[in-house]
Image (cartoon, grey):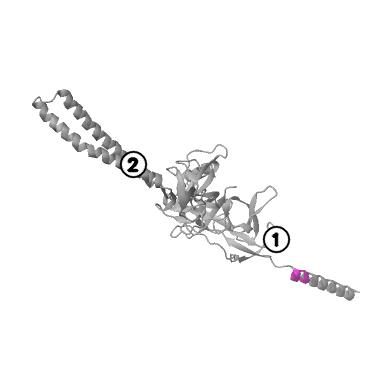
C-alpha cells in the first residue's frame, strides 16, 4: 500500500510539472510595437489662409474725344504694351479743326509786323508832336490786341493738335486686354461711363487673403512670450497653393497688412505680390497662401497616427518607459505639420512614443520595441526649399483652427 501510495504521488507530481511546463511554453511573447524617439528641432510655423488673386494694375480704356470708331487694332485676350494703339477714331473733323486754328494763327501773325511798325512811327512822331497822344495810345492798344490774338490762336492750335492725337486710343499700361465693348463703326463719346475695354497687368499679381484678428492676437502673444523667433526678412516670404493642390513654384512677398478691421468678418486683409511670368495666376483665382508666423526653436513633432483622442476629445499618446512598459500620456497639441502633430506639452525629448501596434497594447503592458519606419510619401507637389533657413519642416495652421 505504501509503495502504491508513493507511485500515485510521483505520478501526480509528474502531471503537475508537465502541466506547468506546458503553460510556460504557451505564454505569448511581448507584443511588438514600432516607436519613434522624441527630439527637439526648429520648426517654421505658417498659417494657411484662403484668398484670391487680383491684378497688379487695371486700366479701363475710355475715349477722350467723341467720334466714330474706324478700326480696332488689337486682338481680344492678347498681351499689349504701353503705347500700343488700340482704336482709331475718325480724325477728319479734328484735322479740320487743327487746320482752321493754324490759319487763324497765321492771320494774326501777319498783322503783327504792320501794327508794330505803326506803333514805332507814332512813338517817334509823338516826340515831334506830329500826332496826338490818343493816336499813340490807340496804336499801342492795337499791338497788344494782336499779340493776345496770337497767344490765343497758338493755344487753339495746341488744343486741336491734342484732340487730333486723342483719335488714336493707346494702351496706358502693359498687360492683358479683355474683350472689346464696341466694334468698328460705333459712335463713342468723350469720357463716357462705359469703358471700351480693360487692361490688367498680371505680372506681378496680387494675392489678397483675410486673417482674423484672433489669429493676429495669438501671434503677438507667442512673440511676446518668446515662443517664436521672428525674422522680418524671411517672414515676409509667402508660399502659394493652387486650387488643384499643387504648390506654386515662385515665392511671393508680403506687401502690407490692412490697418482697418472689416466689421462684418472681424478680419484684416493681407496683401502679397507674386511674380507671374508664365501667366499661371489669373485674376479672381481661388488660392491658399502659407503666411510665415515665425520659427519655434524647440518644437516637438510626433506622427499623427501616434496621437489619439478620448471620449472628451483630449489628445493622448502611448509612451514606452525604460523598462518596456506602456504608459498613457495626455498631450496638448498646437497644430498639424504635414503628417505630424506639433506638441505643446506632455512629451519630453528622448521619450519613445508608439507609432504602430497601438491595437496590441494596454496600460502597464510590457512591449518589445522596434524602430518606426515611416512610409515613403506618394509623388506629388513638394514644398518650396527655404535654403539656409534653420527649419526642418514647414508647419501649417488652417484658418479654420
Left or right: residue 106 versus residue 51 is left
Q: Is residue 67 left or right of residue 309?
A: left
Q: Mark 1 points at which residue?
A: 359
Where does the image place residue 269, in percent across and percent down from the top left?
A: 51, 44
For label 1, the SS is helix
Q: Mark 2 points at which residue?
A: 100
Residue 78 rendering spot, x and y as whole percentages: 48, 56
* Location of residue 114 in the rendering, given as x and y in whole percent from the top left corner: 19, 36
Quick check: 17 above or below 136?
A: below
Q: Is the magenta stretch mostly helix, strand or loop?
A: helix
Say which label, 1 or 2, has the lower sequence index.
2
Left or right: residue 18 compared with residue 348? right
Q: Residue furthest left?
A: 128
Q: Which residue is drawn at 30% across and 42% down?
A: 103
Q: Residues within 10 Å of mark 2 (few under 14, many from 20)?
A: some
Q: Counting other residues with Cα less than 10 Å from the Cα at mark 1, is it few (<14), some (14-19), or many (20 or more)? A: few
Residue 71 is situated, as x and y percent measured from the top left of the image, at: 46, 52
Mark number displayed over residue 61: none
Q: Residue at x 15, y 23 (%)?
A: 133
In this rendering, does residue 59 appear at all?
Answer: no
Instruction: Name the residue nearer the viewer: 82 or 32.
Output: 82
Query: From the image, which quarter does the N terminus lie in?
Result: bottom right
Q: In the image, which is nearer the foreground, mark 1 or mark 2?
A: 2
Report the number of discs: 2
- The magenta region covers 21-26
Residue 25 among magenta residues? yes
Q: Is residue 35 found inside the magenta-colored segment of the image?
A: no
**Residue 25, can we see it?**
yes
Q: Is mark 2 on a helix, strand or loop?
A: helix
Amino acid at each position: 500500500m505504501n509503495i502504491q501510495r508513493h507511485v500515485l504521488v510521483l505520478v501526480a507530481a509528474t502531471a503537475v510539472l508537465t502541466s506547468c511546463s506546458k503553460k510556460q511554453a504557451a505564454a505569448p511573447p511581448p507584443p511588438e510595437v514600432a516607436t519613434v524617439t522624441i527630439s527637439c528641432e526648429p520648426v517654421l510655423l505658417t498659417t494657411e489662409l484662403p484668398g484670391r488673386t487680383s491684378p497688379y494694375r487695371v486700366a479701363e480704356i475710355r475715349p477722350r474725344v467723341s467720334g466714330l470708331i474706324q478700326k480696332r487694332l488689337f486682338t481680344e485676350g492678347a498681351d499689349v504694351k504701353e503705347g500700343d494703339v488700340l482704336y482709331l477714331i475718325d480724325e477728319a473733323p479734328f484735322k479740320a479743326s487743327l487746320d482752321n486754328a493754324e490759319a487763324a494763327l497765321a492771320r494774326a501773325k501777319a498783322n503783327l509786323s504792320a501794327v508794330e511798325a505803326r506803333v514805332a512811327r507814332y512813338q517817334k512822331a509823338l516826340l515831334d508832336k506830329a500826332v496826338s497822344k490818343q493816336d499813340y495810345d490807340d496804336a499801342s492798344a492795337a499791338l497788344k490786341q494782336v499779340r493776345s490774338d496770337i497767344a490765343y490762336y497758338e493755344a487753339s492750335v495746341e488744343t486741336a493738335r491734342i484732340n487730333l492725337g486723342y483719335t488714336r486710343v493707346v494702351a496706358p499700361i502693359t498687360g492683358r486686354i479683355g474683350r472689346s465693348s464696341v466694334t468698328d463703326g460705333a459712335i463713342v463719346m468723350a469720357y463716357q461711363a462705359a469703358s471700351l475695354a480693360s487692361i490688367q497687368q498680371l505680372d506681378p499679381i496680387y494675392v489678397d487673403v483675410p486673417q482674423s484678428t484672433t489669429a493676429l492676437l495669438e501671434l503677438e502673444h507667442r512673440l511676446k512670450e518668446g515662443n517664436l523667433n521672428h525674422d522680418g526678412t524671411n517672414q515676409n516670404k509667402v508660399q502659394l497653393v493652387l486650387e488643384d493642390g499643387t504648390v506654386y513654384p515662385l515665392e511671393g512677398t508680403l506687401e502690407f497688412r490692412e490697418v482697418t478691421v472689416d466689421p462684418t468678418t472681424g478680419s484684416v486683409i493681407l496683401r502679397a505680390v507674386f511674380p507671374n511670368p508664365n501667366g499661371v495666376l489669373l485674376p479672381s483665382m481661388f488660392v491658399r497662401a502659407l503666411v510665415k508666423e515665425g520659427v519655434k526653436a524647440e518644437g516637438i513633432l510626433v506622427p499623427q497616427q501616434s496621437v489619439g483622442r478620448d471620449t472628451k476629445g483630449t489628445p493622448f499618446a502611448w509612451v514606452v518607459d525604460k523598462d518596456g512598459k506602456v504608459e498613457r500620456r495626455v498631450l496638448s497639441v498646437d497644430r498639424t505639420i504635414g503628417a505630424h502633430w506639433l506638441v505643446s506639452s506632455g512629451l519630453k525629448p528622448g521619450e519613445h512614443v508608439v507609432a504602430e501596434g497601438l491595437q496590441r497594447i494596454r496600460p502597464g503592458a510590457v512591449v518589445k520595441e522596434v524602430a518606426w519606419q515611416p512610409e515613403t510619401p506618394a509623388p506629388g507637389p513638394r514644398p518650396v526649399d527655404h535654403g539656409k533657413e534653420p527649419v526642418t519642416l514647414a508647419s501649417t495652421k488652417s484658418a479654420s483652427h
